[in-house]
Image: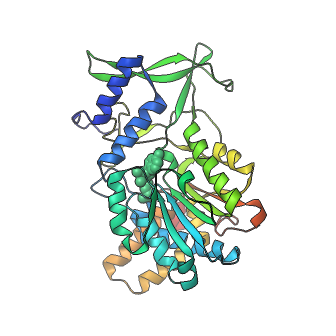
Amino acid sequence: MQNQPRPEPTAAFLELIRRIADNGYVTVAEFMEVAATHYYAARDPFGADGDFTTAPEISQMFGEMIGAWVVDGWMQLGKPEFARLIELGPGRGTLAADVMRTISAWPDCKAAFQLHLVENSPLLRRHQAEVLKGYDPVWHEKLEEVPPGVSFILANEFFDALPVHQYIMVNGEWHERCIGFDRAKDSFFFMTQPYEGAPLPPAPEAAIIEKSPVSLAAMDQIVTLLDESGGAALLIDYGYDQRGFGDTLQTLRRHSFTDVLENPGGDDITAHVDFTALTERAARLLDVHGPAEQGSFLLNLGIAQRAEALQQKSTEKQLEDIQKAFHRLTSPNEMGTLFKVLGLTRKSDIIKPAGFDAAHPLSEEQEE
Ligand SMILES: C[S@@+](CC[C@H](N)C(=O)[O-])C[C@H]1O[C@@H](n2cnc3c(N)ncnc32)[C@H](O)[C@@H]1O
């Protein structure tokens, strides 16, 4: 964790102090929700000068692979005349732009698709409007506002921004992990409250378990839309597919980890995504594919061939950039295994989304 000077209190900081003064504490989920909402409302956090970089911001190859995935799924569905590309949390709009540009290579596919964006940050909406002005996007606060119809839903690093509750084992009993504020020290601190919810599994003292009802509700909206209208969803995030215990709450400022309680609303706040919980929720009504590791998913879709093709016509500097981007997106030491990809399709559609075949063998170079 980096030692950085403490920034000025943000609007989220003040809002959380007000809530704690009213109620004595906030839950970790409430802390995360206030912090994340203010964070995205106040800044464009992407890229080398920001707090973090996402896969579509690393290289156009990422969005091109996803674009090809959408075209393939649309063809398997019999090329419906009207379909929606829906992105949840589109950030700077880079992924949507790369996907739309890729599907434009198939004119009947391009003609079929209308772009819908689910975004709650007014600042990022303005950015998306600029980047995507050629594609006439329609914005929504929530997925349930998107009208029914064949849908291809994309969510890259969306679920990790949604709030999690944390429960902690103290003296043999589960408690909810909460946050108070110490006025004398002018800082937040962790505390616990008795837990009276649904039973949680036995665990050793001090174990922490995370639950995200907001993520499950978002998944329910995806399930409802796909079950009613058909199509497919692709969720890409860093997370775990083996259930376990642990505190995965983290904050980033300028690409370094920070103290999670220090600067709510000023630092990027996330938690790892529980793919097991999301998969179980979706599997009741949908076919579930994966989760696959991002590296093998992209290799299955042909990212190595795409990198080679781009390198054919590139300068020496571009060649190096393409190699670096390919490595970052696919290597197990980078995003290749930590990031997982979950595919969802309607059971009655019986389509086989691309990329989820047996794990693509990672090259020796990648395993270094
Ligand atoms: C980490 S960024 C990912 C951006 C983009 N998908 C990418 O890969 O570059 C999270 C995005 O989700 C949006 N977001 C976070 N919570 C949201 C919510 N509850 N409803 C709608 N959008 C949300 C943020 O404003 C931001 O656009």
Q: Is residue 288 left or right of residue 38?
A: right
Task: Report which quarter residue 250 is drawn in.
Answer: top left
Pinpoint residue 22: horizontal percent, then vertical percent.
38, 18
Give the residue at the far top of this rendering. 171
Pinpoint residue 99: horizontal percent, then vertical percent.
49, 71
Point out the image quarter for the N terminus: top left
Task: Report which quarter residue 2 is drawn in.
Answer: top left
Q: Nearer the viewer, residue 171 or 234?
A: 234
Pinpoint residue 335: horizontal percent, then vertical percent.
49, 57
Q: Is residue 256 visible?
A: no
Task: Report which quarter residue 16 is drawn in.
Answer: top left
Which residue is depicted at the point 54% across and 53% down?
145
Q: Is residue 323 left or right of residue 305?
A: left
- Report how many numbered discs are placed on residues in the image: 0
- The colour scheme of the drawn protein is rainbow
Which residue is depicted at the point 43% across and 36% down?
32
Which residue is depicted at the point 57% across and 56% down?
235
Q: Nearer the viewer, residue 177 or 116?
A: 116
Give the residue at the far bottom of this rendering. 313
Question: As displayed, is residue 183 above or below residue 32?
Answer: above
Q: Is residue 344 left or right of residue 254?
A: right
Question: As displayed, is residue 5 above or below residue 324?
Answer: above
Question: As displayed, is residue 293 above or below residue 81?
Answer: above
Pinpoint residue 308: horizontal percent, then vertical percent.
48, 80
Q: Is residue 92 visible?
A: yes
